[in-house]
Amino acid sequence: MSTPDQQDDAAERVPAQVIKIEGKEVWVATHPVAACARCQSGQGCGAVAISRLFCRNSQTFKLEATGEFREGMAVELLLPARTVLNAALWAYGLPLMGLVLGAAMAGWWWNGQEIPVILAGLAGFILALGLVGVRSRRLLQHPAYQPHLVVPQHEWR
């Protein structure tokens, strides 16, 4: 279990709750949170309503327990911000680049004919999505891409 002084300030923090403990593994559930305090109080711009369309339910994760936890305990999942940025660039940037490069190469090769440009752009997009899938399966095993379970600072007071 990490103490507050060991926590990385440049990390994405997601509030969670311990729901089950199995040996050296801890099951935690996250809950959708509002983007800001105004949204949480119901007075915001409504962006939270859009986020709830895509993530209504809590998500459950099984993590290695590196300390003592109890069921019902409030915890945080930490993932280094650089890791989140890197994953987002791969997930969104590579397919976009595949689409643009595929369409650009077909436009050059077939003198801008629409059908080949569209098909090549789509093929580049699909190929890049496949590469993202292969890379993401590899990175799921890498320790830097695993969330760390910590007790929030208010639990230490």
Image (tube, rainbow, N blue to C red):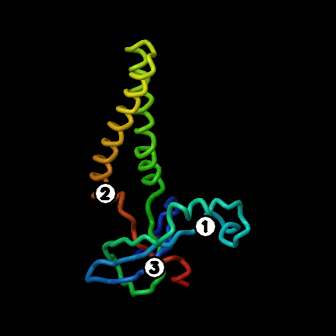
Q: Are marks 2 and 3 in contact (CB under 8 Å)?
A: no
Front one among 73 and 122 = 122
Say few, some or many: other residues with alpha carbon within 10 Å of mark 2 (under 14 / 14 to 19 / 20 or more): few
Residue type pointed to by label 2: Leu
133 over 106 or under it: above or below = below
Task: Say if 22 sits above or below 45 in the image.
Answer: below
Circle 3 residue: 17
Label 3 vs label 1, nearer the camera: 1
Label at residue 78 = none
Q: Report the amino acid beneath label 1.
A: Ala
Neighbour tally class for label 1: few under 14, some 14-19, many 20 plus, Cα within 10 Å: some
Measured as percent of width and height from the top left, residue 8 is found at 48, 63
> Where does the image place residue 135, in percent across and percent down from the top left?
30, 47
Q: Which residue is mark 2?
A: 140
Q: Earlier in the sequence, mark 1 or mark 2?
A: 1
Q: Which residue is mark 1?
A: 34
Three-letter code, disc 3: Gln
Tell me which residue sits at (40%, 87%) in the image: 71
Tally of numbered tags: 3
Which residue is nearer to you in this view: 95 or 116?
Answer: 116
Q: Tell me where residue 64 sits by quadrant.
A: bottom left
Query: For the residue carrying disc 3, how many other residues have a C-alpha within 10 Å: few (<14), some (14-19), or many (20+)?
Result: many
- Which residue is rendered at x = 56% and y = 80% of the image? 154
Give the left or right position of residue 24, taking residue 116 as reference.
left
Secondary structure under the numbered disc 1 in the rendered image = loop
Q: In the rendered view, would you say 145 is above or below 76?
A: above
Q: CA distance from mark 1 to mark 2?
A: 27 Å
Q: CA distance from mark 3 to mark 1?
A: 17 Å
